[in-house]
Image: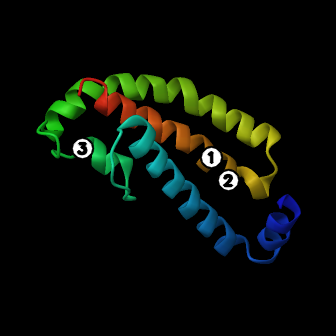
Amino acid sequence: MLLWYQSILARRPVLTQSVTTAVLNTVGDITAQQAVEKRGKIMTGSVLHEWLSTEEGRSPKENVKKNFLPIMATNYMVWPWVQLANFKFVPLNHRLTFANTVAIGWNCYISYMNNRDR
């Protein structure tokens, strides 16, 4: 499978990385919604939109006030190390896939932070 992916990536890099990104973002959204939020429906979209939404009665301003600093603090502890490893060890043509794979866990974390008191 890896050889197949690498051959397609070499032939059509932009299309392959675009489709890979779409698939991994969808997987991240589904994982966050099913495993963290325990929702019965599956829909894709930005976790940030969900984080700021008023679907559960909390205003976006309250959400930002409560979650922004803890999420940003974690962001600065996680992403610099992820990107350091990405640029140091991951071949150029796999860097986007690596970052998007880590983002699945990151989306779950944001979802957890948004839903921890519900």
Q: Seen in the image, is 97 located left or right of residue 24?
A: right
Residue 36 image offset from top left, x and y in percent: 41, 35
> Label 2: few (<14), some or many (≥20) within 10 Å?
some
Residue 11 image offset from top left, x and y in percent: 80, 77
Residue 47 image offset from top left, x and y in percent: 37, 47
Q: Vertically, is 26 above or below 36?
A: below
Q: Which residue is mark 2?
A: 97
Q: Vertically, is 36 above or below 28?
A: above
N-terminal of the two: label 1 or label 3?
Answer: 3
Quadrant of the rendered structure where residue 103 is? Answer: top right
Image quadrant containing the C terminus: top left
Residue depicted at 39% across the width and 28% down the height: 71
Q: Disc number at residue 25?
A: none
Q: Which residue is mark 3?
A: 52
Residue depicted at 36% across the width and 59% down the height: 43
- Foreground: 81 or 118? 118
Residue depicted at 79% across the width and 45% down the height: 90
> Label 1: few (<14), some or many (≥20) within 10 Å?
some
Helix, strand or loop for disc 3: helix
Q: Disc number at residue 101?
A: 1
3D distance between C-alphas at marks 3 and 2: 26 Å
Residue 23 image offset from top left, x and y in percent: 57, 61
Q: Seen in the image, is 53 located left or right of residue 33?
A: left
Tell whether label 2 touches label 1 (CB within 8 Å).
yes
Helix, strand or loop for disc 2: helix
> Label 3: few (<14), some or many (≥20) within 10 Å?
some
